[in-house]
Amino acid sequence: LGAELRACGVDLGFTPVLDLDHGDSGVIGDRAFHRDARVATLLAKSLMHGLLQAGMANCGKHFPGHGFVKADSHVEVPVDKRSLKAILADDAKPYEWLSTSLASVMPAHVIYPKVDPSPAGFSERWLKHILRGDLGFQGAIFSDDLSMAGAKVAGSTLDGALAALRAGCDLVLLCNQSVDGGEAVDALLDGLMSAAQAGQWQPDGDSEARRLDLLPLTPPLPWDELMHQPAYQHALETLP
């Protein structure tokens, strides 16, 4: 997977999905490895190892867990009413166990009202206090797609980007916006620059270092060379 993506010019995979399959979420469903956090963690670790062999960084998602709620954050604002203790003991366990192996993490556009009134991706408590402080994660944090309905509780796309960055995200995503020549992306970049100039938000050196750490250290094998690479051929033969 990692080698093929890199041969196509992709240098970071927004995987593994660390959500647990509680059986009710249509948007997560079989994207999850398993219901059991231990099994999900072991399978995710194997995927991450394969990506690492190809020189590709990973991204665990959707912290602290999207698999318990039925609502789809692409079109709704999901609300998970469990306690922090319950979430940390179950859905968030993979993030604790993989905290030193994950290159990056993507928080969920899910509200956990017993922890914070804002979705996890806009919550300083979730990102700075729990993910970084309690679980010891030191890698980069991506926002989930700011064009999703679950992100609109923060206001406009620019409002959402600023809220995510202030909460502890190092990078923000605005996906599926290639229409109109990518005007939405350009508008967001211009808005962030203006906000920085106005003192509403300032990037910091630690965040920049975390972003740079995601870049590959080695060049990818071109597709034609990859097809004849022994390790790749062995992997293909091993697959069922």
Image (spheres, rainbow, N blue to C red):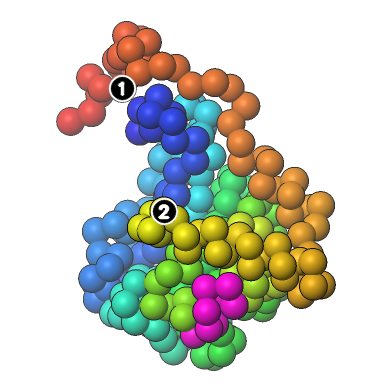
Q: Residue furthest left?
A: 240
Residue at the location (47% across, 27% down)? Answer: 54
Chain part drawn in magenta: 153-160
Task: Describe residue 145's horizontal placement relative to residue 31 as left or right.
Answer: right
Question: How far across and down, in percent of the image, does residue 78 sit?
Answer: 38, 82
Q: Please count the marks in the image.
A: 2
Question: How far across and down, in percent of the image, does residue 22 sit?
Answer: 30, 72
Between tags 2 and 1, which lies in front?
2
Query: Does residue 91 appear in the picture of this structure?
Result: no
**Tag on residue 207?**
none
Question: How far across and down, in percent of the image, does residue 48 sit?
Answer: 47, 40
Disc 2 is placed on an element classified as helix
Quadrant for the C terminus, please: top left
Q: CA distance from mark 2 to mark 1?
A: 39 Å
Quadrant for the N terminus, please: top left
User: What amino acid type should be assigned to the residue bearing mark 2?
Assistant: Gly
Disc 1 is placed on an element classified as helix
Residue at the location (44% across, 31% down)? Answer: 9
The residue pinned by badge 1 equals 235
User: What amino acid type should be assigned to the residue bearing mark 1?
Assistant: Ala
Would you place residue 3 above or below residue 31 in this image?
A: above
The residue pinned by badge 2 equals 181
Q: Are marks 2 and 1 in contact (CB under 8 Å)?
A: no
Residue at the location (62% across, 27% down)? Answer: 217
Query: Does residue 138 appear in the picture of this structure?
Result: yes
